[in-house]
Image (tube, rainbow, N blue to C red):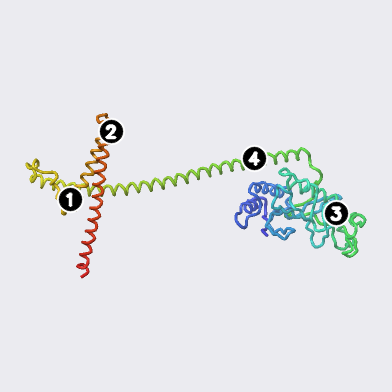
Amino acid sequence: MVPPPPNHQAIQQFLSSVLSQRGPSALPYTEDTKWLIRQHLVSLTSTFPSLEPKTATFTHNDGRTVNLLQADGTVPMTFESVTYNIPVIIWLIESYPRHPPCVYVNPTRDMVIKRSHSFVNPSGLVAVPYLQNWIYPSSNLVDLARELSMIFGRDPPLFSQRPRPSPNPSYHPNQSSLTNPSTFGSVGSGYPRQMVRPPQYPPPSPPYGGGEGKAGTEDAAEVFKRNVINKLVENVHGDMLLLRKTRESEMESLFSAQAVLRRREEEINKGLKEMRDEMEGLESQLQVVLMNTDVLEAWVRQNEGKVKGGMEDIDVDKAFECVDVLSKQMLECTAADMAIEDVVYSLDKAVQEGAMPFVQYLRNVRLLSREQFFNRATAAKVRAAQMQAQVASMAARAPRYAS
């Protein structure tokens, strides 16, 4: 259990600290209600200094344990013009303040709970009308404590089980009526049969700071004013939550845009790097081309004088010499095939321009196609013969390499 703070300022700091905790030690209240819970407890401790906020472990009926806030102390009540303090514990359950708190009467060792009390069961659980008619967000702990004081003043829930003391001069005369057994009854069959009376406690001393005070009804104007203030506070709190959600959504959209921009930046950087690499490759290829150009230009300059003056006597058909008969035959077939292609192309142009009759075009194309077919067939056979000869040559050279 966290110990209670010593003063009002310390109480505010204590509540701000425990309600702002995160992680496993965080209290199980929703974020949108923590501010209102703090206000309720601050107002309660200001109005009833005998009640102090703490954190303690609460055990549910199903055995679950949870760390909750509680207001522990006493509530003053006035019975027959004498003020007494009733020890209570007000637990703020997980769903508070949308649901009412859980209030228990906390008797000391010399006290017992009144049997068949209208609002307190034998376990000490309090069920006053204010709890049953709890309305969020107007209901609060201060009004609850006032109603407890008023109801307990009409019907005290606790009795002292100490034996009746002998008369002494220090006994308060106004408390004589409290010893009448007809007023409160006996303790019960489970206790010694003796005269009992309501708790006769001296006026409360610090830190409770009790004393005789009014416990009657409150002015309706004050109640209305407090309800209006609570409503305004709730509206302001709701507007703050709405504004916070709006800003969070805007931040989420900005974060998304930032992520897209970063991804695009990475893509641009990657593309820029690829372009630089390609530029370097092109520059290296350009250097190779320039070097080859210089070599070719040098060769042309060296051989230009050799053929100068004898260009007219060069036979184009003899410009290339074949190494064997198959190569010469391949050259002739390839040349004839390409020449027929050129002739067919010229015939197509002539037909389109109307310079040749269509019948004559078909006859010439049929003859040329036949001749081109034979040339291509011959070239295929020559190519096969060349491939076979090359394989045979490689096979003949293999034993020499092996030896």
Q: Residue at x 72, y 61 (%)?
A: 63
- Find residue 281 and report its horizontal and vertical position in percent: 29, 49
N-term-proximal mark, 1 vs 3: 3
Find disc 3 in the rendering and name its residue. 117
* Disc nearest the viewer among 2 and 1: 2
Secondary structure under badge 2?
Answer: helix
Residue marked by disc 4: 236
Q: Which of 361 and 1 is in front in this view?
A: 361
Q: Find disc 1 in the rendering and name its residue.
A: 328
C-alpha separation, residue under disc 3 versus residue under disc 2: 127 Å
What amino acid type should be assigned to the residue bearing mark 1? Lys
Task: Report which residue position mark 2 lands on.
Answer: 359
Q: Where is residue 287 in the image (x, y as percent from the top left)?
A: 23, 48
Q: What residue type is labelled 3?
A: His
The mark found on residue 338 in the picture is none
Left or right side of 246 for 315: left
Q: Earlier in the sequence, mark 1 or mark 4?
A: 4
